[in-house]
Image (tube, grey):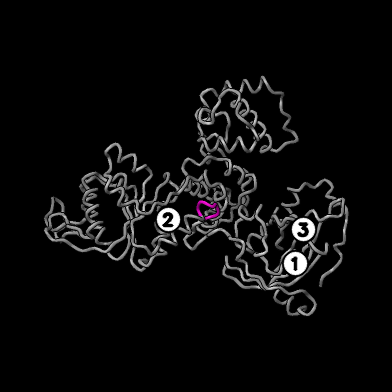
């Protein structure tokens, strides 16, 4: 069923329809569509394609369809013979756990010299059509495992960025090794989620993971919670005594969150429990053997705390056998949209809604600096779902009342001399005609001008970050985005 209707044509004319409008049209059809260049770089995928593969759009774009992706790719034929090619393919989609047959048609688009400029493909699941036409088409069997797709597991962990992929790989390698793990990183990055992942993959998963936040209880109560107590150990103690959380974790995993808040007196007791695998309840003379694995988390540098005497050095070394650093969300931008889509799916289901984000709304999320990290993103997505009008499905713009207004990503004027910057900008630049521009284009234009002014005034990214009240990484990213260099 190969056809030659895709014979060379010199130019593809779209009239007054922009590329963005064409993409919007493709997003509203049920057939999966992708566009790639002659180097196999993915330039565009529509919503149906994302749904078919089960891979976030943000990861797919600008990736390459390697030879491993389709072992018998019709793209090879199109590139070689420069014609439209149609085929049935038996697909084993590892990412969604599905096997199906699809009908694919790849159409070449030529430039003025007759060379292929783009290839547009349409894909449909088509078992019945295959049965009817199997003798007249090219057949191919393909295992979709060569794309190294992002990890989105049953617990909702999204790992699109290389940093998170590395973490997921590390959790798999260390899951069955009974040694202490220290998870570090800023607040809200998902350290507890990583601890859950270690437990889920480990040979201790049949037993529960017992967890406690060390900052949530005063010292006396924390000791009683961790080690338990005997009858009459202190005023208010239960008559029958109580088993501590370390004993509760026997055979499983004990997760101590914010271990940096553990009082010095308890640090010594915890160290002994780790080394001897025994505990003694408050008010007891009897040692109890406990088989547990310790996973702890901190949002502060324990090494610095050791230097200033607020954390035991011997305990630090005992905890830090394996360290997993979870970076801030603004250091792994590739994860932002996939995480947002995952949260949207969960909250849409929870609140019986069908809310989606427009490209403009996604751009707002990407430009935000995320001081609260993944926790903040989750809260914002929930607020979007519950506050969006019930008759609205696509959110075109995220209100400033939802995104933190103190963050510079919504206003490039958030510094101590904001009004002065505005005045200087108005005086030094001509009036900008916004009648023929989108709000997003206009804001980018203004943001670039302000950053150029800051570059002329300051000589380091650190000084600019302080002036704009954003982190240094965001400043560097914005400078690269607009091609601005420091003087």
Mark 3–mark 1 Cα distance, whole angstroms, equals 11 Å
Please name whichever residue, 136 or 355, is drawn nearer the observer in this view of the structure: 136
Quarter holding the C terminus? top right
| Quadrant in the rendering for residue 196 | bottom left
Please name whichever residue, 236 or 299, is drawn nearer the observer in this view of the structure: 299
Mark 3–mark 2 Cα distance, whole angstroms, equals 40 Å
Q: Earlier in the sequence, mark 3 or mark 1?
A: 1
- Could you say where residue 441 lies in the image, as x and y percent from the top left? 68, 37
Please name whichever residue, 179 or 183, is drawn nearer the observer in this view of the structure: 179
Q: Which residues are magenta?
A: 159-164
- Indicate which disc residue 119 carries: 3
Q: Nearer the viewer, mark 1 or mark 2?
A: 1
| Quadrant in the rendering for residue 252 | bottom left
| Quadrant in the rendering for residue 398 | top right
Neighbour tally class for label 3: few under 14, some 14-19, many 20 plus, Cα within 10 Å:
many
Q: Is residue 163 left or right of residue 128?
A: left
Give the residue number, with chain letter if any, for mark 2.
194
Q: Earlier in the sequence, mark 1 or mark 2?
A: 1
Label total for image: 3
- Look at the numbered discs 3 and 1 and tell me whether their residues touch, using CB distance below 8 Å: no
As helix, strand or loop, the secondary structure at mark 2 comes to helix
Which residue does the image show at 62% across and 44% down from the upper left? Answer: 363
Q: Earlier in the sequence, mark 3 or mark 2?
A: 3
Quarter holding the N terminus? bottom right
Mark 1–mark 2 Cα distance, whole angstroms, equals 40 Å
As helix, strand or loop, the secondary structure at mark 3 comes to strand
Which residue does the image show at 73% across and 70% down from the upper left? Answer: 103
- Indicate which disc residue 74 carries: 1
- Could you say where residue 82 lies in the image, as x and y percent from the top left? 83, 62
- Could you say where residue 68 lies in the image, as x and y percent from the top left? 65, 65
């Amino acid at each position: 069923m190969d056809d030659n209707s895709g014979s060379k044509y010199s130019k593809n004319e779209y009239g007054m329809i922009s590329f963005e409008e064409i993409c919007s049209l493709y997003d509203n059809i049920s057939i999966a569509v992708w566009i790639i260049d002659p180097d196999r770089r993915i330039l565009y995928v529509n919503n149906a394609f994302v749904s078919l593969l089960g891979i976030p759009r943000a990861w797919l774009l600008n990736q390459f369809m390697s030879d491993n992706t389709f072992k018998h790719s019709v793209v090879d034929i199109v590139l070689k013979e420069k014609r439209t090619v149609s085929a049935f393919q038996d697909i084993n989609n590892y990412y969604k756990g599905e096997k199906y047959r699809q009908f694919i048609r790849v159409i070449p688009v030529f430039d003025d010299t007759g060379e292929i400029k783009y290839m547009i493909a349409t894909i449909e699941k088509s078992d019945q059509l295959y049965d009817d036409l199997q003798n007249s088409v090219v057949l191919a069997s393909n295992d979709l495992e060569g794309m190294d797709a992002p990890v989105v597991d049953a617990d909702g962990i999204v790992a699109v960025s290389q940093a998170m992929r590395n973490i997921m790989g590390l959790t798999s390698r260390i899951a069955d090794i009974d040694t202490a793990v220290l998870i570090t990183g800023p607040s809200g990055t998902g350290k507890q989620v990583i601890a859950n992942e270690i437990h889920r993959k480990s040979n201790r998963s049949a037993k529960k993971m017992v967890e406690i936040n060390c900052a949530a209880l005063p010292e006396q109560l924390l000791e009683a919670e961790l080690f338990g107590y005997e009858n009459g150990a202190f005023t208010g103690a239960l008559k029958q005594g109580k088993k501590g959380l370390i004993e509760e974790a026997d055979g499983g995993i004990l997760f101590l969150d914010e271990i940096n808040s553990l009082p010095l007196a308890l640090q010594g007791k915890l160290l002994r429990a780790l080394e001897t695998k025994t505990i003694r309840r408050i008010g007891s003379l009897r040692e109890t053997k406990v088989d547990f694995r310790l996973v702890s988390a901190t949002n502060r540098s324990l090494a610095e705390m050791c230097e200033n005497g607020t954390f035991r050095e011997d305990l630090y070394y005992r905890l830090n056998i394996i360290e997993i650093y979870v970076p801030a969300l603004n250091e792994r931008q590739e994860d932002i949209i996939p995480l947002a889509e995952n949260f949207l799916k969960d909250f849409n289901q929870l609140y019986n809604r069908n809310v989606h984000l427009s490209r403009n709304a996604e751009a707002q999320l990407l430009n935000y600096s995320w001081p609260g990290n993944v926790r903040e993103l989750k809260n914002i997505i929930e607020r979007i779902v519950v506050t969006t009008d019930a008759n609205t499905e696509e959110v075109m713009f995220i209100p400033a009342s939802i995104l933190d207004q103190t963050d510079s990503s919504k206003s490039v004027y958030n510094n101590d001399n904001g009004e002065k910057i505005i005045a200087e900008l108005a005086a030094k630049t001509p009036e900008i005609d916004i009648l023929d521009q989108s709000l997003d284009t206009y804001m980018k234009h203004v943001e670039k001008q302000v950053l150029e002014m800051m570059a002329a005034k300051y000589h380091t990214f650190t000084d600019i970050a302080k002036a704009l009240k954003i982190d240094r990484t965001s400043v560097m990213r914005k400078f690269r985005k607009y091609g601005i260099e420091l003087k």
